[in-house]
Image (cartoon, rainbow, N blue to C red):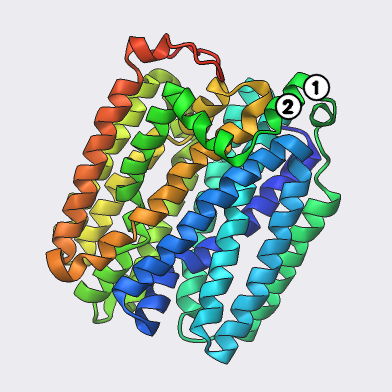
């Protein structure tokens, strides 16, 4: 990975992820304070539906007009969203804060398929796997730094944040405009390939149903996401409920929101440190073992979160969840890159990314059921969902599915 523009893209992705995860874990708390859990869950579901739509359209346009235009539009979306967030926080407008997060979510969802396809365009198969691991490490740096920054701006809007965030999004726009060359092959698609790339929204959705591997992968991932997304949805509210008083860790007194930030930091730091090693070890076990084992460990971590009453219990749950993440640290994007036709890569990544957008529709709904089934029941529902995911991932690697030759994809051989 000696291409300088790829380094610029990784840097830009780090900025995007940090800005997004600075808001995402805390937007639930913002909306719960401003409205009520039911309205907050509905509002987040609306954002997630828009994310599904923007992600699919992002994949279609990334294949149709190129990756760079989608990256430019996404970076401009982040710029506008950040400005709206700053104004909303200063003015005390929860509607404006909600709108800024909605716009940022749409921009983020539309970027993902273009960003993943961009890596696939420029790098060979061996380099792709390293790049996907690196992007995941960047993601975890952002997931670590973002909530940490968010915990400090939750009650105030310091001037250093205003300056730093504006410089960051302007840098993001600069990289997209002048440091992101388009891959030349995208400009030279044949007529037949261009017709395939110019698919409509409904055709991109049907794409999932046509390829059994993609369909099972997306459905299984949605069930798994109901568990691991609770790290950012149920866990913060659970900590506020059970660890409402300040606690002391290594002589430092921290409140509930900082307790939460420290748990996310633990998760992020471990993935950053162990990510490359986990990717190398992934060649020692099958993709099926990684997918299924990850889902089972996610379920176990949800049970621990559901019944923990102190920081140590939550810390152990985060460690188990981290191991689950590491099992699939590089295999998911590599799997999608392997089954995607060359002229539909961005659409395949967009379709695969639906698993996150759909999950953001359903995962927040567990928060609305907390008054009825308490946090314990909500986490048990998430654990059961993850076990369903493990079963579906097991089915994904049955020989009848692996041997399936879809009209939109090509078979790949997996070590079982």
Residue 175 disc label = none
- Are the residues tagged 2 and 1 within 8 Å (C-beta)? yes
Residue assigned mark 1: 191
Q: Which percent across, then down, holds residue 397?
A: 35, 18
Q: Is residue 194 left or right of residue 404?
A: right
Residue assigned mark 2: 195
Q: Which percent across, then down, holds residue 217?
A: 40, 30
Total number of numbered labels? Answer: 2
Figure check: 345 above or below 272: above
Q: Secondary structure at mark 1?
A: helix
Q: Quadrant of the C terminus?
A: top left
Residue in the image at 42% along x and 22% along y: 212
Q: Which percent across, then down, holds residue 179?
A: 83, 48
Asked whether residue 308 appears in the rendered view, the answer is no
Q: Quadrant of residue 368?
A: bottom left
Q: Which percent across, then down, holds residue 372?
A: 14, 68
Q: Residues within 10 Å of mark 1 (few under 14, many from 20)?
A: few
Asked whether residue 383 appears in the rendered view, the answer is yes
Q: Nearer the viewer, residue 341 or 116?
A: 341
Q: Is residue 372 left or right of residue 174?
A: left
């Amino acid at each position: 990975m000696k291409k300088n523009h790829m380094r610029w893209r990784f840097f830009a992705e780090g900025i995007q992820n940090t800005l997004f995860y600075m808001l995402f874990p805390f937007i639930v708390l913002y909306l719960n304070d401003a409205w009520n859990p039911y309205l907050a869950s509905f509002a987040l579901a609306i954002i997630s539906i828009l994310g599904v739509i923007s992600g699919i359209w992002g994949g279609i346009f990334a294949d149709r007009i190129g990756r760079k235009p989608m990256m430019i539009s996404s970076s401009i979306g982040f710029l506008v969203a950040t400005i709206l967030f700053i104004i909303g926080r200063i003015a005390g407008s929860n509607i404006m804060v909600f709108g800024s997060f909605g716009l940022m979510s749409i921009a983020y969802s539309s970027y993902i398929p273009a960003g993943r396809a961009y890596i696939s365009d420029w790098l060979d198969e061996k380099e792709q796997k390293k790049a996907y691991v690196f992007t995941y490490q960047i993601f975890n740096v952002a997931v670590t730094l973002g909530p940490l920054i968010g915990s400090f701006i939750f009650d105030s809007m310091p001037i250093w944040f205003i300056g730093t965030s504006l410089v960051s999004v302007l840098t993001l726009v600069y990289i997209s405009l002048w440091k992101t060359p388009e891959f030349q092959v995208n400009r030279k698609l044949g007529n037949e390939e261009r017709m395939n790339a110019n698919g409509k929204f409904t055709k991109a959705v049907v794409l999932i149903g046509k390829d059994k591997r993609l369909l099972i992968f997306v459905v299984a991932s949605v069930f798994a996401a109901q568990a691991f997304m609770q790290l950012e949805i149920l866990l913060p509210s659970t900590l506020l409920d059970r660890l409402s008083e300040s606690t002391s860790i290594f002589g430092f007194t921290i409140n509930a929101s900082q307790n939460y930030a420290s748990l996310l930091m633990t998760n992020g730091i471990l993935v950053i440190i162990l990510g490359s090693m986990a990717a190398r070890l992934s060649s020692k076990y099958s993709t099926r073992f990684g997918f299924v084992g990850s889902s089972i460990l996610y379920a176990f971590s949800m049970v621990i979160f559901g019944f923990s009453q102190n920081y140590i219990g939550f810390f152990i749950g985060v460690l188990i969840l981290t191991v689950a993440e590491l099992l699939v640290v590089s295999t998911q994007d590599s799997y999608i890159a392997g089954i995607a036709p060359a002229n539909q890569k961005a659409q395949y990544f967009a379709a695969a990314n639906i698993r996150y957008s759909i999950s953001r529709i359903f995962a927040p709904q567990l928060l609305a059921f907390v008054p009825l089934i308490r946090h314990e029941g909500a986490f048990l529902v998430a654990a059961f969902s993850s076990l369903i995911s493990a079963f579906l991932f097991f089915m994904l690697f049955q020989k009848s599915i692996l041997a399936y030759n879809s009209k939109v994809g090509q078979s790949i051989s997996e070590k079982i």
